[in-house]
Image (spheres, rainbow, N blue to C red):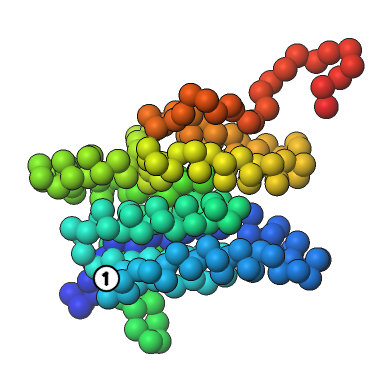
Amino acid sequence: MSNSVPYVLAALLDVIGYRGRLERDRETGRFEFKDALQRAVSALSEVNEAEYAYQAISDMIIVTCSRIDDILGLLRVLKSVQLSFLREGLLIRGGVAYERHFKSSNITYSHALALAYQIESSLAIYPRVVIDHNVIDMKRGNAGEWSQLTESNLVCVCNGVYFLNILDEDNWGGVYKWARNVYEADRESLVRREKEFMKHAWVEDYLFGSPFAKDNFERYMPTPTLLTREGTE
């Protein structure tokens, strides 16, 4: 392979439930989903395009950064994007990878995007942006960079999977409200659809498992109950 194909950090984000919301727009003719997408993607309008290249195609958002030492900058951009989508009632998931990537006016040739897609489709599963463990390991080898990464509070780890943390002391209450609103809007359509239901359950667990969780907020997802004579449908 030619050495002219550089390595980049690449993030591939996917809107969860895109087809269903697209169909809803088609049926109603109100284009509410289109408008929400436009507002959500506007978070990228403040990004310095000299540092972070991005494009939105259908249900997919791609963000790349040519500097591996700027992983914190990229994660802050992705945090802003994920919060922007959640604010508009949209859940996203994605993958972040470091690999070769080439883009011209005619073609995009990218091992980075292929790996990011693999991570998104096989590991993200829930509404989260998973970071390739190799990216984390590269930082672990440098004491200064490792300290910056861990002190940024931008990365969570669970079961060996690293993913973007979008919660902090100041925004927890707002994220809780947005996540609850998304669930309430989808609640009726989630009955007997366990995969979709568990995505919302994961978000709630993530919220209340955070060190920034507030004590005066209640959980909003239903829990298993015993069947009674009256029934519990």
Residue 114: percent from left, percent from top: 40, 62
Crowding near pointer 1: few (<14 within 10 Å), some, many (20+)? some
69 vs 94, left or right, is left
The one nearer the camera, 100 or 57, is: 57
Relative height, residue 151 to residue 81 (above, below)? above
Relative height, residue 215 to residue 36 (above, below)? above
The answer to whether residue 75 shows anywhere in this view is yes
188 vs 110, left or right, is right
Residue in the image at 38% along x and 77% along y: 108
Residue in the image at 52% along x and 25% along y: 216
Find numbered disc 1 in the image and state the secondary structure of the residue it sits on. loop
Residue 149: percent from left, percent from top: 22, 45
Which quarter of the figure has residue 44? Answer: bottom left
Pick out the residue farthest to the bottom: 105
Q: Which residue is mark 1?
A: 51
The answer to whether residue 95 shows anywhere in this view is no
Q: Quadrant of the N terminus?
A: bottom left
Relative height, residue 230 to residue 58 (above, below)? above
Residue 104: percent from left, percent from top: 34, 83
Residue 144: percent from left, percent from top: 10, 45
Residue in the image at 28% along x and 66% along y: 65
| Amino acid type, label 1 | Glu
Number of marks in picture: 1
Which quarter of the figure has residue 210? Answer: top left
Q: Quadrant of the C terminus?
A: top right
60 vs 141, left or right, is right
33 vs 58, left or right, is right
Which quarter of the figure has residue 112? Answer: bottom left
